[in-house]
Image: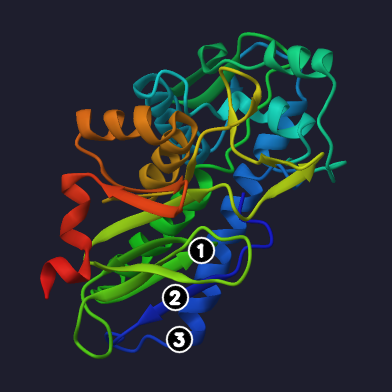
Amino acid sequence: CIRDSSYTVKLVELAGELEPAEIQAEIDVILENINRQMSTYLDDSELSRFNRSASTDWTDVSPQLAEVLKQAQQLSALTNGAFDVTVGPLVNVWGFGPAPGEDEMPAEQTIRDAMGRVGYQALQVRGSPPAVRKDRPDLYVDLSAIAQGYAVDAVADYLQALAVDDYMVEIGGEIRARGRNARDTLWRIAIEKPSTGSRVLHTIIELDDVGIATSGDYRNYFEQAGRRYSHTIDPATGRPVTHRLASVTVADPSAMRADALATALMVLGPEAGYRFAEKHELAAFFIVKGEDGFYDRATPPFRRYFVSERD
């Protein structure tokens, strides 16, 4: 889930006898454990073993995996399937999964076969004792759109348990920040313009005790016959999204929820996504491809994070 992702942890002050090297070592252990629970890139992870199993009986899992799957199922129901961790077969046939892709559109029958395996309703989760069950033996779960946010939360919660009140945690672009930075100001984060070329600043936001995640179509994609195919797959169509939403950033107290909701809004698109965010009072920032460049829209709860709103 966090394979090949770099991470950054910034702390302003350490309490007591804490040493940076000791904290980094513990963070590495936390992240390695999450990978061994939730990665589809590790053959021996809990999730990979569950995906390989043809059993439709309850399978015991770690409390952490059960918690992420429980949250995922709740968000799937909330978004009416726009977020769906069982979309993995479609992600794989389009070449965006653990196996190297061919950078070409799959055959129609291949897409239809994969769609037949997708549906969050076929996944059951229980908390006590923690276990999961699939209603069909070929169900495949991919947590890449939620587990990275969970990892950010896990590191942030570890720091707070050490009484570290001023920190910024970033893993693969998902972030959670609290308190103030070394200049005694709120943490400032840049939102990029969704360009496939050089990285260009679009706007700056300030964070305090909140997580943020961005989903976009401009980093992971392939082109065929002059058409771009994004890694964001719509479970309802079985195909990459084709609307004009280039990226969406969500702020939420939980980086895990922000991660999943950003994916859901990216699937829903600029209009339906914005209406959903407004209805559920989400803090969301949309960057849309227009005829003459990009334009953006922010829901009212997100506007508090703009630096210009504070200055």
Q: Which residue is mark 2?
A: 9
Find the distance from the CA under tag 1 to the CA under tag 3: 18 Å
Find the distance from the CA under tag 2 to the CA under tag 1: 9 Å
Q: Which residue is mark 1?
A: 171
**Badges 3 and 2: C-beta atoms under 8 Å apart?**
no
Image side of residue 31 versus residue 154, left or right: right
Dot 2: what SS? strand
Three-letter code for the amino acid on which mark 1 is drawn = Ile
Image side of residue 290 versus residue 17, left or right: right
- Does residue 294 sit above or below 7 in this rendering? above
- Does residue 308 sit above or below 79 in this rendering? below
| Residue 222 at least partly seen | yes
Looking at the image, how many numbered discs can be counted on the residues? 3
First along the sequence among labels 3 and 2 = 2
Three-letter code for the amino acid on which mark 3 is drawn = Pro
Dot 3: what SS? helix
